[in-house]
C-alpha cells in the first residue's frame, strides 16, 4: 500500500488482522451450529474456538500491527523511475488479454498444477483415509507457487506490452481465480463423486470448500502480486527512459 501511495497503515493493519480470522471463525460457528442441530458427534469444541480467538488476539493482532508499523515507517518503497502524473490512455486490448478470459485462464493453469494432489487430499479428508506423501505435497506446493509466479509475470508482461499499465488488480485476480477453480472442483466431487443426498451435509461440505478455496485463492493472489511487483520493479530499473 505504501508503494502505491497509501498512508493509513493502522487501517490496513486492522483489516488484515480482523477480516480473515473472522471469516474463518464465522464458517466454523455455522458448521458447529449445523452439527449441533443434527446431533452430530463432529462438533468442534467451543473451548478450542475460545483458545484460538485468544491466540489470535495475543499473537496475530499485535504482530500484524508491528509488521505494518515497520513497513510504513522503516522502509523506503519508491518507484525505480519518476512516474508521470498524467495517466496514459490504455489502448484497446487483444481478446486474449480481456479481464475475464485472462484471469480465468491464468487461474485454471494455476489450478491444474495442483489438481492431482488436491484430489488425493480431498478424497482422503472426506473419506477418512490416511494422507500420505507429505514430502511430495511439500514439493508440489512449492512448484505451484513457482507456476503462479511465472503465470502472473507472463500476464503482466503481455499487459505492459499492450499498453495496459494497470497490472496490480489483474495480477491479484489472476491468482485469486485459482480458488474459483478449486471451488468448482469441490462442487463436482460433491455432486458426482461423493453423491451426497443430505441437505445439511451438502451445506457443511460447501462451507468447508468455500473456506479452502478462498484461502488457497488468497495465497495464490499474494504470490501473484508480489511476483509481478518484483518483475515490474526490476524491469523499470533497467529502463533508460526519462
Image: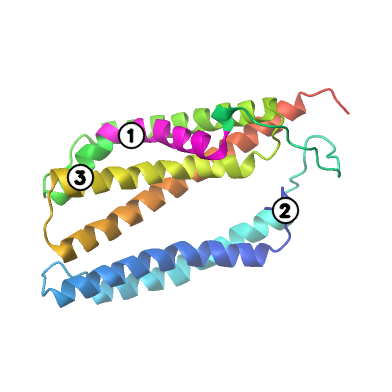
Looking at the magenta stretch, what is its main secondary structure? helix
Could you say where residue 198 lies in the image, as x and y percent from the top left?
12, 62
Q: Which residue is mark 2?
A: 74
Highlighted range, magenta? 98-116
Could you say where residue 77 lies in the image, as x and y percent from the top left?
74, 45
Residue count near mark 3 (Cα–Cα under 10 Å), binned few <14, some 14–19, many ≥20: some
**Secondary structure type for disc 1:** loop
Instruction: Judge whether residue 225 can be spotted in this image.
Output: no
65 relative position to 47: left or right: right
Q: In the image, which is nearer the foreground, mark 3 or mark 1?
A: 3
Q: Residue at point 39% right, 73% down?
A: 54
Could you say where residue 4 lies in the image, as x and y percent from the top left?
72, 49
What is the basis of the colouring in this image? rainbow
Residue in front for this viewpoint, 134 or 120: 120
**Secondary structure type for disc 2:** loop
Q: In the image, which is nearer the foreground, mark 2 or mark 3?
A: 3
Dot placed on the residue nearer the N-terminal end, 2 or 3: 2
| Residue 189 numbered tag | 3
Could you say where residue 66 lies in the image, as x and y percent from the top left?
60, 62
Residue count near mark 2 (Cα–Cα under 10 Å), binned few <14, some 14–19, many ≥20: few
Residue count near mark 1 (Cα–Cα under 10 Å), binned few <14, some 14–19, many ≥20: some
The reply to whether the magenta stretch includes residue 207 is: no
Q: Is residue 182 above or below residue 48?
A: above
Disc 2 to disc 3, how far (Cα)? 48 Å
Q: In the image, which is nearer the foreground, mark 2 or mark 1?
A: 1
Q: Is residue 202 above or below residue 129?
A: below
| Residue 114 numbered tag | 1
* Quarter of image, res 49: bottom left
Instruction: Judge whether residue 183 can be spotted in this image.
Output: yes
Amino acid at each position: 500500500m505504501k508503494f502505491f501511495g497509501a498512508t493509513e497503515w493502522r487501517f490496513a493493519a486492522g483489516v488484515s488482522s480482523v477480516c480473515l480470522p473472522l471469516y474463518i471463525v464465522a464458517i466454523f460457528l455455522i458448521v458447529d451450529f449445523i452439527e449441533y442441530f443434527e446431533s452430530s458427534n463432529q462438533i468442534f469444541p467451543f473451548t478450542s474456538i475460545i483458545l484460538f480467538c485468544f491466540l489470535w488476539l495475543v499473537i496475530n493482532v499485535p504482530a500484524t500491527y508491528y509488521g505494518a508499523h515497520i513497513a510504513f515507517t522503516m522502509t523506503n518503497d519508491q518507484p525505480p523511475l519518476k512516474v508521470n502524473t498524467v495517466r496514459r490512455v490504455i489502448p484497446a486490448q487483444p481478446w486474449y488479454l480481456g479481464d475475464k478470459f485472462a484471469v480465468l485462464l491464468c487461474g485454471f493453469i494455476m489450478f491444474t498444477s495442483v489438481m492431482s494432489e488436491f484430489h488425493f487430499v480431498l478424497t482422503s479428508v472426506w473419506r477418512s483415509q490416511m494422507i500420505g506423501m507429505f514430502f511430495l505435497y511439500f514439493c508440489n506446493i512449492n512448484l505451484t507457487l513457482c507456476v503462479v509466479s511465472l503465470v502472473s509475470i507472463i500476464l503482466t508482461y503481455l499487459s505492459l506490452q499492450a499498453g495496459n499499465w494497470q497490472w496490480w488488480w489483474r495480477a491479484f485476480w489472476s491468482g485469486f481465480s485459482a480458488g474459483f477453480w478449486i471451488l468448482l472442483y469441490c462442487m463436482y466431487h460433491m455432486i458426482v463423486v461423493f453423491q451426497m443426498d443430505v441437505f445439511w451435509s451438502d451445506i457443511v461440505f460447501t462451507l468447508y470448500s468455500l473456506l479452502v478455496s478462498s484461502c488457497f485463492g488468497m495465497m495464490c493472489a499474494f504470490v501473484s502480486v508480489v511476483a509481478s511487483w518484483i518483475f515490474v520493479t526490476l524491469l523499470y530499473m533497467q529502463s533508460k527512459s526519462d
